[in-house]
Image (cartoon, rainbow, N blue to C red):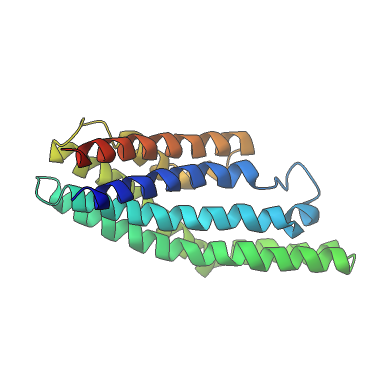
Amino acid sequence: MQTRPRLGAITLAASGLLFLAYPALRPDETKMDPATAMASNQWILAHLLGVFAFILAGLGVAAVRDRVRETRGAEAGRWAMITTWIGAGMTLPYYGAEIFGVHEMASRAIADNNPALLDMVDSFRYHPAAVTTFAIGLALLGAGGVLTAIAIGRSKLTGAWTGVVFAIGLALYIPQYFTPMPVRIAHGAIIAIGAAWVAVAMWRGAKK
């Protein structure tokens, strides 16, 4: 059946584009007034795109799992889906707070003319439980990307290197947070290219 792998290909490609759109549209609070950046509607939009990127990536990896089910890549594909889903589940609560909580803190700081309220942002971001679950979630997503590449390589359904760029992009998700925004945008482009590469292979495979 051609519909499911093609839908999976579209889903994965869309996730890659959203991983690029998120940093590209995200207001850079290091280059402008932090409160203004965080209180903007663009802050909410950009982070919501990031949320959907993680969700669609999980669905896309599930489609890869289905594609390699009858090959030597089946076991790696199954674990790729599991780790990606758990990773996304542990990552997204942090994003929810970043989207709405930080936005409201910044909006109140502007309304009350009280920049000190922004001190709460770092208190939330670096809360031990928050940062630990976030880091574990992103590490699992990186592992999911690597397992996806392994599953594709073992399947022999397409080129052995097809999933490597996608895996590199997800594996670099934690370190890219400590880089300037242009680097973060470039990182988003890496994921977009990697996801598109896998998606094209899935689309072509659906014709066979």
Q: Residue 33: x percent and y percent?
A: 81, 49
Q: Is residue 140 visible?
A: no
Q: Residue 34: x percent and y percent?
A: 77, 52
Front position in the image: 208 or 126: 208
Q: Is residue 153 left or right of residue 179?
A: left
Q: Is residue 27 left or right of residue 73?
A: right
Q: Which residue appears at 75% of the width and 56% of the height?
A: 40
Q: Residue 173: x percent and y percent?
A: 46, 46
Q: Which residue appears at 55% of the width and 61% of the height?
A: 95
Q: Which residue appears at 65% of the width and 58% of the height?
A: 44
Front position in the image: 50 or 142: 50
Q: Residue furthest right?
A: 113
> Where, quadrant-wise, is the C terminus in this rendering?
top left
Query: On the image, which quarter does residue 89 sit in?
Result: bottom left
Q: Residue 194: x percent and y percent?
A: 38, 36
Q: Is residue 105 left or right of residue 145?
A: right
Above-or-below relation of 78 to 181: below
